[in-house]
Amino acid sequence: MPIDNWTTGNTTSLTGISTGAWFGEGSLLKKEPRRYDVMAIRETRVAYMSRSTFTWLLDNSIAFNRFMITQLNERLGQFIGMMENERLLDIDTRIARVLAALFNPVLYPGTTHFLQISQEELGYLAGVSRQRANQGLKVLEDAGLVRSEYGGIHVLNLDGLRSFGD
């Protein structure tokens, strides 16, 4: 459902979620309790949609169905990309791609060029330690792609992040 701040899980994080993003539709589609932990790491507002509203929209709204298909397709692409990145890329490139993935306009429509994300959180998303995330950020800063600031990371060149390491 739409949310209003970054959220992520614990050390087994798979992704962060920004303002305007959705999560949880899989559990509603499968009619099962959420099987995965979700943890707000900052003050967060979450809009809840009941199962009855969700199923009514699926049954009665072509636009909602298209939205859901697009969401699921984008999320599938994101997870396939994450698997590929984890298996094939060096750590600095993986960190660049993790940051770039947080700018998916379908999954994260409210993302600005300043990400409120700590080095520890970035490390969780990239599957590396905070110290290694710090080193990777330094490489990306030296390349002119990002600037670490108090409370987050300012992305200076999104296309450069997306193509880093190619």
Image (cartoon, grey):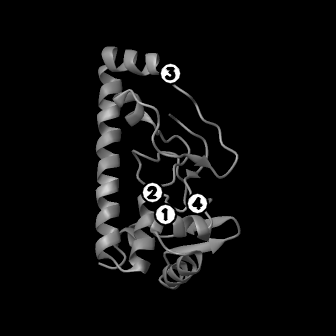
Up the image or down, 81 lies above or below 73; here it is below
Residue 14: assigned label: 2
Image position of 114 (left or right of 109): right
Instruction: Work out how far the residue at label 3 is from the one at label 4, CA to CA, in angstroms.
Output: 30 Å
Q: Position of residue 76 (x, y in %)?
A: 30, 49
Image marks 1 and 4: residues in contact by CB distance under 8 Å: no
Image marks 1 and 2: residues in contact by CB distance under 8 Å: yes
Classify mark 1: residues with Cα within 10 Å, few (<14), some (14-19) or many (20+). many
Q: Secondary structure beneath disc 1?
A: helix
First along the sequence among labels 2 and 4: 2
Residue beneath label 4, please? Answer: 115
Residue beneath label 3, please? Answer: 50
- Residue at image position (49%, 63%) is 125
> Hey, what amino acid is under mark 4?
Leu
Q: Secondary structure beneath disc 3?
A: loop
Q: Nearer the viewer, residue 50 or 70?
A: 50
> Looking at the rendering, which quadrant does residue 30 occupy?
top left
Instruction: Work out how far the residue at label 2 is from the one at label 4, CA to CA, in angstroms.
Output: 17 Å
- Residue at image position (51%, 54%) is 16
> Hey, what amino acid is under mark 3?
Ser
Instruction: Work out how far the residue at label 1 is from the one at label 2, CA to CA, in angstroms.
Output: 6 Å
Classify mark 2: residues with Cα within 10 Å, few (<14), some (14-19) or many (20+). some
Q: Position of residue 122 (x, y in %)?
A: 54, 67
Instruction: Work out how far the residue at label 1 is from the one at label 3, CA to CA, in angstroms.
Output: 29 Å
Up the image or down, 52 lies above or below 14; here it is above
- Residue at image position (45%, 17%) is 53
Residue beneath label 1, please? Answer: 125
